[in-house]
Amino acid sequence: MKHTVILADGTVLPAIGQGTWYIGDEPSKRKQEIAALRLGVELGMTVIDTAEMYGEGLSEELVGEAIADIREQVFLVSKVYPHNAGQDRIARSCEQSLKRLKTDRLDLYLLHWRGNIPLGETIEGMERLVEAGKIVRWGVSNLDTADMEELVRLAKGSHCVVNQVLYHLGSRGIEVELQPWQRERGIPIMAYSPLAQAGTLRRGLIANRAVQQIAEKHRIQPFQLLLAWCIRSGDVLALPKASTEEHVRQNAAAGEVELTEEDVNHLDVAFPRPSRKVPLDII
């Protein structure tokens, strides 16, 4: 893949990976979803993102089956529930995720969102998992700037390599404060729902005249343009979900698209970022 992202620890990853929210929920789609994930890895989308929350483990189980014989090719990410992120539970949660994923380690383990457990306690638990070889590195998800500032002030909080947040053309709030703050510290963004969730918003993005014109210019589909836009800055790793092989191929191809300054400016006019700080979007 042409576009890449560098994590805070220097690890280089493809700028488009594979999300798995809702994957594994329907047994009738299992073979199709496994085939899609495997094709994605073959096409260079080697980052696979899951969580213990997704289907209460069903997603992890499906991912584990999909990557059983290609584990070494995959950069595997999972997330811990906030209520499981304390010293007394995080190791057990991690072990259960590893069991479902049929692997001995996670390449990246994330705090799914901030809960009531002190960040310092979660950091300590993450660091112990690193020492034990259960995870290679750790990060966070759904943390806004103030949370990130608090995190990095804590002992070993600077070991956080990524923050996964909602980000797409219709939700640009992170560009005002959070993304610049992370950019200064070399902590990239992982973007979940980079195409927006299915519904009115997604349809509005894809049907937008500017989106359609620029997609036509590059001879790609509108949703491929949304992915190319999402990773344009070089410090965002997008995690679209694709449950069919056709969509997987189209997602991978979006990683080869080069947008011009004119393209980006045109989209800025159609979908301007907020003029001031707004609350972090979370779904």
Image: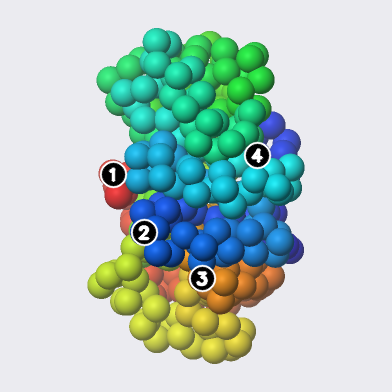
Q: Marks 1 and 4: which is nearer the front? A: 4
Q: Position of residue 179 (x, y in %)?
A: 49, 45
Secondary element under disc 4, as helix, strand or loop, is loop
The residue nearer to you, when weighing 280 against 83, is 83
Three-letter amino acid code at the position of disc 4? Leu
Pointer 1: what residue?
Answer: 279
* Separation (CA) of disc 3 from disc 2: 14 Å
Three-letter amino acid code at the position of disc 3? Thr
- The numbered mark, 3 or 4, whose residue comes first in the sequence reads 4
- The numbered mark, 3 or 2, whose residue comes first in the sequence reads 2
Give neighbour class at mark 2: few <14, some 14-19, many 20+ (Cα, 10 Å). Answer: few
Q: Position of residue 96 (x, y in %)?
A: 47, 27
Q: Marks 1 and 3: which is nearer the front? A: 3
Give neighbour class at mark 3: few <14, some 14-19, many 20+ (Cα, 10 Å). Answer: some
Is 273 placed above or below 73 here?
below
Q: Marks 2 and 1: which is nearer the front? A: 2
- Disc ID at residue 244: 3
Pointer 2: what residue?
Answer: 26
Q: Position of residue 165 (x, y in %)?
A: 42, 45
Name the residue: 40% across, 64% down. 28
For the question of whether residue 232 can be seen, the reply is no
Cβ–Cβ under 8 Å for marks 3 and 2: no
Pointer 4: what residue?
Answer: 7
* Separation (CA) of disc 4 from disc 2: 33 Å
Q: In which quadrant of the rendered view does residue 187 lie?
A: top right
Locate the N terminus by quadrant: bottom right
Give neighbour class at mark 4: few <14, some 14-19, many 20+ (Cα, 10 Å). Answer: many
Q: Marks 3 and 2: which is nearer the front? A: 2
- The numbered mark, 1 or 3, whose residue comes first in the sequence reads 3
- The numbered mark, 1 or 4, whose residue comes first in the sequence reads 4
